[in-house]
Amino acid sequence: MEKKKVVLAYSGGLDTSVILKWLIEERGYDVIAYAADVGQGAEVDGIREKAARTGAIKTIVSDLREDFVRDFVFPAFRMNAVYEGTYLLGTSLARPCIAKKQIEIAREEGAVAVSHGATGKGNDQVRFELTYLALEPEIEIVAPWREWSFAGRSDLVAYAEEHGIEVPRIAGKTYSSDRNLLHISYEGGILEDPWAEPPSDIFQITTDPREAPDEPEEITIDFERGDPVAVDGTRCSPAELLGELNRRGGRHGIGRADIVENRYVGMKSRGVYETPGGTILQTAHRALETITLDREVLHLRDSLIPRYAEMCYYGYWFAPEREMIQAACDEVQKVVTGTVRLRLYKGSCVVTGRKSPRSLYRGDLSTFEAGGAYNQADATGFIRLNALRLRTRARIDHGG
């Protein structure tokens, strides 16, 4: 009888390598190993060979870098999405991108199930599985960390050694990391103590701001309908543009963050992040919006940012409420076209200029000089009408 197929989101690390063998030995599946390249660099090198040695019947490596930036990062950045005031959602946006392709592969390969290596304590299990079920309601899901008897990673190492699985080891590394084109995240190990300073050698793509170049660098970013399209006048694809800003920002130590955040499952977790290109993009995008968006539109949109960011963080990318807010946001972004100039220097990203053919900024209205189109006498009636309810309450309070 033909075995059932499962598509495993496979990274080649300890967890998913053990999961691959466990799905074969303990569950009797034929395993299709699926690796998504969302910008993690050399981590995908040699992954086909390793999966085959561990027992996969097929390995699929999907280059999702452009999809990730164009279809997930840019929409969230049009919304200026930030979770709890600091986190730019690098992992949160990558998971639905990866899971979407995983479902597509399951359909193409005739697989009845999908599997992932997320633990039962984190956010990623929710992000993966909400995406699976939103796109393929009847798909079977195998979540080994919620099912097997292994208590921790020492058990995984023992299982790997027993079954001849290569175990990646990094001397002295006590934390885990996750990388994509938007960021690198670090958690666990020494970072579980919120008082402990991150080790100086933890950072991979950003220079220590104290050691960054002594000369500032000025750059320009062009936007069209809310999306960045060019750096210093050179047009780039979405992934190329974000990669270039990562290099520029990383050289100047921009985009480091140390956060204690609230996980969806209910616990607090400390994470350290490097998001150089994303930090530059958000700063530039907000600056352009200040001259292109109407005041009430801007304020209303900003009131929705915490809710939208929460949806992304919790894993509701394919939920109708996220799509509804996105549609409204994208309608607003039609006028967000123009250029922003920024200065990068020792960890700071400062706007030094912004211009747009759709600018609402009018010098003849805002000037402090004599003349202009604004009649200052009009403010008298405006103020008295707006003060009417305040004056009425004051009279009552004073017994008038």
Image (tube, rainbow, N blue to C red):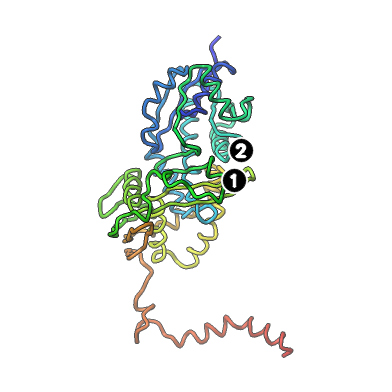
Q: Amino acid at mark 2?
A: Lys
Q: Find the residue positioned furthest to the right.
A: 399
Q: Quadrant of the C terminus?
A: bottom right
Mark linked to residue 155: none
Residue at the disc numbered 1: 263
The quarter of the displayed image where residue 264 is located: top right
Horizontal side, residue 32 vs residue 276: left or right: right
Determine crowd level at label 1: few under 14, some 14-19, many 20+ residues with C-alpha closer than 10 A.
Answer: some
Determine crowd level at label 2: few under 14, some 14-19, many 20+ residues with C-alpha closer than 10 A.
Answer: some
Q: Amino acid at mark 1?
A: Arg
Q: Find the residue positioned furthest to the bottom.
A: 400
Horizontal side, residue 285 vs residue 309: left or right: left
Q: Position of residue 76 (x, y in %)?
A: 46, 50
Q: How many marks?
A: 2
Residue at the disc numbered 2: 121
* Residue 189 vertical placement versus 385 (above, below): above
Q: Position of residue 59 (x, y in %)?
A: 42, 22
The quarter of the displayed image where residue 122 is located: top right
Q: Nearer the viewer, residue 383 or 80?
A: 80
Q: Position of residue 324 (x, y in %)?
A: 53, 50
Horizontal side, residue 158 vs residue 374: left or right: right
Q: Nearer the viewer, residue 362 or 170?
A: 170
Q: Earlier in the sequence, mark 1 or mark 2?
A: 2
Residue 266 shows in this picture: yes
Q: Are marks 1 and 2 in contact (CB under 8 Å)?
A: yes
